[in-house]
Amino acid sequence: MNIFSRLFSRTFLDSWREADADADTARTGQFDWRPIVVLATTALTLTLARYYGGADTFSRLVPDGRKAYSKEDWDLMVRAWWTSVRCVTYVLIPVITIWLMPGERVRDYFISFRGFVKHMWIYVGLYLLVLPFVLFVSQFDSFQHTYPFYKYANQSLEHFLRWQVLYALQFVALEFFFRGYMLKGLRHKFGYGAIFVMIVPYCMIHYPKPIPETLGAILAGIALGTLAMRLRSIWGGVVIHVGVAMTMDWLAIGYCPPPGEGPCK
């Protein structure tokens, strides 16, 4: 128990104290406009992603697509649109915003690879920690009806891998937005509280998913946010997100029809 207590103190409490110390240092009595900009653009980003990143928007842009392409290709194109919109909203809008903010640099927003390999064991440990939970929930109908998002990923290894590439790109964008842009942009004002501001919208984007995963996103957001803030890097979060997502899809495909006999549920 002492080992876990020391690990929690070193990983979480020390990181939170350090973030608070930085916030205290940054409090000069001057008006800080960065939180206003970051939170306003966060609301804008999430709104655009929600209203324009779905199949309905893509169908309006390509009205004859369903007739012109096979069901497998059309569904993958819809998923590619979903990924593209998230890359534009989660990355391009924050990057432009950072460029426009005096004194701010994109490279300071936790995108460094420095120390990434050195601390990889932490993320491997987190993956092994959540793996039993993933194996457990994969047995439920709600899980099997949700994953994989690309319902034709069961048709061949090529279909599966093409989808995983799109899925992984979306996670890079997601981690930069939540664990890079939001945390770095809010840290100087809120200290470690920036983590808990970030997990509110992060939890909410999971609402269409099964409730165990949505509740788990709260804990995952705290853990990944703390590590990103401590290590100044989002890439460990990308790795664990991609690893868990690929595992979930692979498990879900086990409940799908065999190749050639129809899509997943």
Image (spheres, helix red, strand yellow):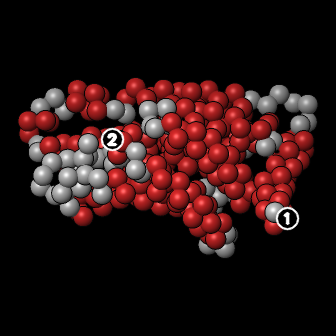
Left or right of 173 in this view: 217:
right
Seen at 62% across and 66% down, the residue is 125
Q: Foreground: 50 or 258?
A: 258
Q: Mark 2 packing: few (<14 Cα in 10 Å), some, or many (20+)? A: some
Seen at 62% across and 41% down, the residue is 218
Would you place residue 202 above or below residue 235 in this image? above
Q: Which x, y percent locates residue 58?
A: 26, 32
Alpha carbon separation for disc pair 2 and 1 = 41 Å
Q: Foreground: 216 or 158?
A: 216
Asked which secondary structure carries label 1, the reply is helix
| Corner quadrant of residue 15 | bottom right
Would you place residue 39 above or below residue 122 in this image? above
Q: Which residue has dot 2 on it?
A: 145
Q: Foreground: 224 or 180?
A: 224
Q: Foreground: 30 or 72?
A: 72
Q: Which x, y percent locates residue 153?
A: 26, 54
| Corner quadrant of residue 94 | top right
